[in-house]
């Protein structure tokens, strides 16, 4: 039996990107006529000239944080969907509310590849503990399991005692859900003297998986792998057997950009995750997730050749109110852009004498002067602040553009 879902996982990187952009151009040419927001995004862009990753930088990003307003102005999907709502399989609702479409295509959310990498195979029975109520979670994993020809127990969230009984009698071999709920189920089964040993593998998402929890679950005989997924994009990246970061899913291009901007950062730098997904129903182009991550060097030792990322490293939206005015990460990035002699920058917000104060710490070359940078800081933010020039490499690589250090309360 193959250790890979299909041959696409191990193809050379150049072949993958060439095929991606070929298919993307074809989808965009059709979809832009049907999706007004996509059409605006592609205004003045020559689709035929988009042939490599670097070409994407000329296209503006669509921010997840803007979806609610976009959908209010152009219901139900903000002008991003290329099909009418009546032709969809499901219309789903996430908190906000934010509305997400689901089409009829096989493995529409891209979950099958992640489940396969986690050890799920044809004939397995999957206990799916993601929510089926309005939100996409349960449907994301179920569609992937069905693509693998697996039976699904649609357990959803909660009903712990019933789920434990179902495990005991139905003997599921795989689990999908949050890692902490899997621990709850295993603990509850032990307390009730019910057998949960049939579960041998799990694909988890939606919550942190610290090393201690992974070790505890694996000591119970469950091989645990993670997936990075969102309600808009489906499964973006997934873990394989060596646990060497998360491998970007096929059919996705992932960029890491400076938070609040569309400017790509160097590999290894922490920044905001921006994703382009090949989906003819909902062709999201440079969709800024609001999550932080970083690219890992080289391919995984498992043999899959797509880009790897470190996983979820926090939220990119660090918008902060200072002296009654909002300051955005994009403004801090603009200051650095105007002063190319600077490296990493970070705006520190503190309280002194019952007043907000801000200090821009900037990595600068020898002889770099703070005064012109302070003038730019005031020009961009409309607020006065100090500038401190610090040594190159002294600011942490964590993607933070704004650090609010004011005491809570």
Image (tube, grey):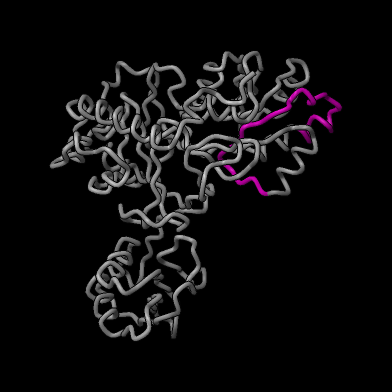
Q: Does residue 266 appear anywhere in the picture?
A: yes
Residue placed most toward the observer, 147 or 321: 147
**Point 55% across, 24% down: residue:** 5
Q: Which residues are magenta?
A: 186-210
Picture quadrant of residue 385 = bottom left
The verdict on residue 192 being magenta is yes
> Could you say which is closer to the camera, residue 358 or residue 82?
82
For residue 98, which quarter of the picture? top left
Vertical arrangement, residue 190 with respect to residue 394, above or below: above
Q: Return the x and y of residue 314 as percentages of the image width and height.
A: 50, 54
Furthest residue in direction left, as rendered: 44
Query: What residue is shown at x 78% (from left), y 32% (from top)?
Result: 221
What x and y, as percent, mark residue 374? 29, 80
Residue occupying the far right of the picture: 193
Please check the rendered image and state whether residue 125 is part of the magenta-colored stretch, yes or no. Answer: no
- Is residue 326 positioned above or below 39 on the image? below
In the rendered image, the quadrant that contains the N terminus is top right
- The percent position of residue 174, horizontal first and vertical second, equals 67, 24
Q: Residue at x 26, y 40 (%)?
A: 70
Question: Does 219 appear above or below 407?
Answer: above
Relative to the observer, which residue lies in front, 407 or 31? Answer: 31
All told, the count of numbered labels is: 0
The x, y position of residue 72, in whole percent, is 26, 38
Q: Quarter of the image holding residue 201?
A: top right
Q: Main secondary structure of the magenta part?
A: loop
- Does residue 269 appear left or right of residue 64 in this picture? right
């Amino acid at each position: 039996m193959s250790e890979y879902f299909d041959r696409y996982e191990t193809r050379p990187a150049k072949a993958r990107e060439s095929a991606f952009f070929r298919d993307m151009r074809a989808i965009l040419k059709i979809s832009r006529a049907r999706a007004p927001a996509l059409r605006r995004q592609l205004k003045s862009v020559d689709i035929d000239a988009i042939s490599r990753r670097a070409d994407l930088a000329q296209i503006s990003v669509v921010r997840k944080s803007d979806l609610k307003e976009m959908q209010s102005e152009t219901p139900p999907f903000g002008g991003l969907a290329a099909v009418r709502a009546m032709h969809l399989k499901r219309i789903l609702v996430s908190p906000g509310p934010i509305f997400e479409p689901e089409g009829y295509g096989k493995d529409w959310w891209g979950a099958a590849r992640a489940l396969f990498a986690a050890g799920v195979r044809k004939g397995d029975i999957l206990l799916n503990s993601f929510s089926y109520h309005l939100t996409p979670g349960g449907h994301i994993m179920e569609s992937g399991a069905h693509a693998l020809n697996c039976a699904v127990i649609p357990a959803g969230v909660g009903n712990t005692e019933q789920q434990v009984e179902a495990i005991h009698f139905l003997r599921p071999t795989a689990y999908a859900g949050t890692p902490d709920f899997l621990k709850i189920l295993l603990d509850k089964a032990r307390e009730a003297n019910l057998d949960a040993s049939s579960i041998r593998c799990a694909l988890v998402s939606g919550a942190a998986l610290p090393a201690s929890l992974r070790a505890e679950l694996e000591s119970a005989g469950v091989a645990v792998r993670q997936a990075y997924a969102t309600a808009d994009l489906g499964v973006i990246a997934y873990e394989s057997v060596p646990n060497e970061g998360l491998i970007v899913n096929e059919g996705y291009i992932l960029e890491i950009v400076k938070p609040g901007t569309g400017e790509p950062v160097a590999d290894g730098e922490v920044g905001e995750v921006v994703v382009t997904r090949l989906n003819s129903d909902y062709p999201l182009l440079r969709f800024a997730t609001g999550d932080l991550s970083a690219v890992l060097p080289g391919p995984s030792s498992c043999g899959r050749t797509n880009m790897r990322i470190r996983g979820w490293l926090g939220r990119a939206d660090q918008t902060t109110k200072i002296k009654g005015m909002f300051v955005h990460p994009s403004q801090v990035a603009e200051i650095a852009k105007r002063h190319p002699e600077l490296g990493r920058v970070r705006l520190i917000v503190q309280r002194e004498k019952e007043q907000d104060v801000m200090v821009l710490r900037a990595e600068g070359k020898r002889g770099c002067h703070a005064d012109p940078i302070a003038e730019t800081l005031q020009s961009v933010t409309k607020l006065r602040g100090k500038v401190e020039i610090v040594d190159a490499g002294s600011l942490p690589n964590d993607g933070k553009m704004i650090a609010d250090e004011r005491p809570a309360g």
